[in-house]
Image (cartoon, rainbow, N blue to C red):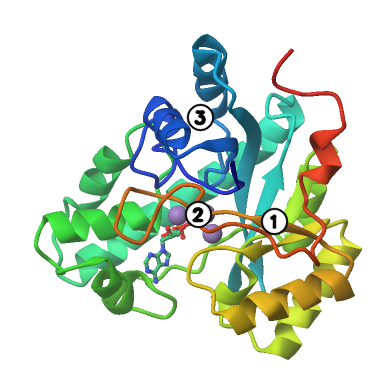
Amino acid sequence: MKIDLHCHTHYSDGALSPSELLMRALNQHVYVLAITDHDTVDAIDSIIALQQKEKRALKIVPGVEISTAWHGFDIHILGLNIHWQDEIFAERLKQQQANRLQRAQKIADKLTAAGLGDAIYDDAKALAGEGQLTRAHFARALIASGKVDNFDQAFKKYLGKGKRAFVKPNWISVSEATQWINEAGGVAVLAHPSRYDLSAKWLRRLMLEFKTAGGKGIEVIYPGLSPSLKNQLSLYAKEYAFYGSAGSDFHAPGRWSELGRHLALPDSVTPVWQLWEDAEPRVDS
Ligand code: AMP
Ligand code: MN
Ligand code: MN
Ligand code: MN
């Protein structure tokens, strides 16, 4: 039985629709799945409706992955088990979504100025559909038009921090995102702490600030971690009294990417799902 608390649908930069994701989770024997799209909860209603129709033993945890800015770094804060229909929260997410669109327009302008044509915004927007427009969509548009060979190149040449089409995002702060999540009844979890290129000293500053703002957990298990990093993250969880989370950050089926795979938490870590497991179920009523 597998628990996976981090994944994306096509309402952000995931490849699968809510129903495709649900079927895949069932096939992979995942029994608790948090849906955590970038800055949107648009997938949650339909996936819960489908889950109830299927009457299968899969629990959906309503979630979100909020983009924040912290000392020039893009830090991702997961909100787990949130009241996704909270109106104030929805209004707040709209701010982020407006920021996303403004940034996307500026990214497109820079790509056009770099000689990549003027169709790039429309191409990326078409790929995103009604979902949030992310840099991943620009990367896919660049690949589709033959401007770059792969995802990595798109980020290394154009979209990554400091590259030709990089636009400094206008995200909210870590504390603000944490407050939004707490006020929407959710649990704030620092996503993939080792993926920010922060030194140990800066990561500690981040965790302290996050904790002070009301952050409850950190991701301890996710793909690509070495045993020593897993150990380090478990130690941080203990030291800062954070609950531990585990998630695949699934975006699309692939050789290295699967829902629920290798996500067991070390015994020394207190699982974040303890926080809502014994509480009133939020989605089954
Ligand atoms: P955004 O939130 O619009 O800045 O887009 C970020 C998304 O692009 C992330 O969630 C990843 O899925 C993807 N991404 C970001 N950086 C990279 C990178 N260096 N290589 C590949 N994908 C990336
Ligand atoms: Mn993503
Ligand atoms: Mn992330
Ligand atoms: Mn993610």
- Please tell me whether residue 114 is drawn above or below residue 1 in the rendered image: below
Of the residues tagged 2 and 3, which is closer to the observer? 2
Q: Is mark 3 within 8 Å of ligand 4?
A: no
Neighbours of disc 3 within 10 Å: few (<14), some (14-19), many (20+) = many
Which amino acid type corresponds to the residue marked 3 in the rendered image? Ala
Of the residues tagged 1 and 3, which is closer to the observer? 1
Name the element at disc 3. Answer: loop
Quarter of the render that holds ligand 2 = bottom left
Viewed as shown, does residue 251 lie left or right of 79? Answer: left
Q: Quadrant of the C terminus?
A: top right
Question: In the figure, residue 22 lies in which quadrant?
Answer: top left
Q: Are marks 2 and 3 in contact (CB under 8 Å)?
A: no
Q: Quadrant of the N terminus?
A: top right
Q: Nearer the viewer, residue 230 or 99?
A: 230
State the separation of the CA atoms marked 2 and 3.
Answer: 16 Å
Q: Nearer the viewer, residue 75 or 95?
A: 75
Residue ID for mark 2:
249
Residue appearing at x 63%, y 56% in the figure: 246
If you read the primary sequence from the N terminus, does the residue marked by circle 2 or circle 3 appear first?
3
Viewed as shown, does residue 90 lie left or right of 16? Answer: right
Q: Is mark 2 within 8 Å of ligand 4?
A: yes
Image coordinates for residue 63, horizontal then vertical, percent:
64, 39
Which amino acid type corresponds to the residue marked 2 in the rendered image? Asp
Question: In the figure, residue 77 lies in which quadrant?
Answer: bottom right
Name the element at disc 2. Answer: loop
If you read the primary sequence from the N terminus, does the residue marked by circle 1 or circle 3 appear first?
3
> Is residue 112 visible to us here?
yes
- Please tell me whether residue 226 is drawn above or below residue 167 in the rendered image: below
Residue ID for mark 1:
245
Residue appearing at x 51%, y 48% in the figure: 260
Residue ID for mark 3:
43
